[in-house]
Image (cartoon, rainbow, N blue to C red):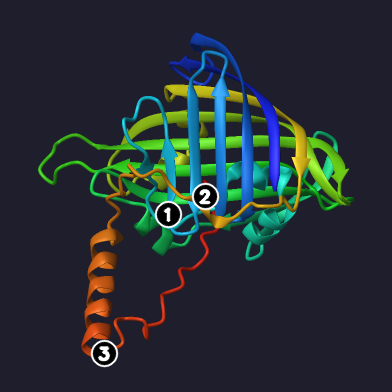
Amino acid sequence: MFAMGKVRMSSTTSKSSKATKKGMGEVHGGFVVWQKKPELWCVEMVVASGTKMSAGSDGKVAWRQTPWQQQAHASRGLPRPIRRCVQGLDPKSTADLFSSAASVGEEAVDGVDCFVLRVDAEPSALHARSGADVEVIRHALWGYFSQRTGLLVRLEDSHLLRIPRPADAASASMYWETTMASTIGDYRPVDGINIAHAGRTVVSVSPFTRAAGAVDEADADVDARRKRPCTCMEETWSIEEVEFNIAGLSTECFLPPRDLVLSDSKDQPRHNKEQGDKAAKGARDGDGGCGIRAAVPRKPLVPV
């Protein structure tokens, strides 16, 4: 699949959810997306100032490259589908993402009656995406699907991180909560498939401190959440061109940059050791390791 579109982004910071402190203005740009499979994709975005950002996945590792990073960096954990495709560009990716979701009720979104599905990242996936400097506590996703058409009209995301402190530190733990809310619409048929051609996403990032074990109580306190400092980013996007079954789109098109820096995931050292042990065993058995069946990772449920 190939898709090309335009994007408009803006951001604001505030001392609380009601008191805006300052705005950062608007930035306009364009993006292109290439996808062969849900875990095989590449996206590039260029804004008006000429700044270019890119990300991708070759099915084994997901990576990102930005101007403020001298080298491309690998994301922690197993590769996940790209959010842009889940937001109405690739119905199969959306269906796979919510294949094991739980129904949590019904709700009207902009006058459209929807059924709501929720999916949570498994503990093993959270552990793989954690590292020595950050712990992923939870990652949940909600999909709002039209009861009449079955199409996705809203996507919500909640991501909670904890920054570890030394055991003897007197200060409380530092947490970062990221929430995303996307409205999706303007569905048009492309080769007989309904594809969303427009949408809007609002992202809020808020830090807060809590004593160990008090995070759930803090999340339940709506007033406390409103008083947190918050950085909000808004993205409005539109799709100008979509094509399927692109000729010549091979796996080589999704290879990561040569200067890729691997992540320091908690599971990375153990994974490397296990692979080394298996290769050594294969060599001792006289098959050079070729007789060992490669491990097939479980598909992560939450997109990047």
Figure check: 23 above or below 97:
above
Q: Is residue 226 in view from this perspective?
A: no
Left or right: residue 187 compared with residue 276:
right
Left or right: residue 284 compared with residue 54:
left
Label 1: which residue?
Answer: 61
Q: Which mark is residue 46?
A: none
The Cα–Cα distance between marks 2 and 1, rounded to whole angstroms, is 10 Å
Of pointers 2 and 1, the one earlier in the residue sequence: 1
Q: Mark 2: which amino acid?
A: Phe
The Cα–Cα distance between marks 1 and 3, rounded to whole angstroms, is 30 Å
Q: Which mark is residue 254?
A: 2
Quadrant hosting residue 218:
top left
Q: Mark 1: which amino acid?
A: Val
Q: Point out residue 195 in the picture as x, y percentages from the top left corner.
A: 80, 44
Q: Point out residue 50 in the picture as x, y percentages from the top left corner.
A: 51, 17
Figure check: 255 above or below 231:
below
Left or right: residue 134 compared with residue 169:
right
Q: Secondary structure at mark 1?
A: loop
Of pointers 3 and 2, the one earlier in the residue sequence: 2
Quadrant hosting residue 72:
top left
Q: Secondary structure at mark 2?
A: helix
Q: Residue at x 71, y 52 (%)?
A: 247
Q: Are marks 3 and 2 in contact (CB under 8 Å)?
A: no
Q: Which mark is residue 286?
A: 3
Q: Residues within 10 Å of mark 1 (few under 14, many from 20)?
A: many
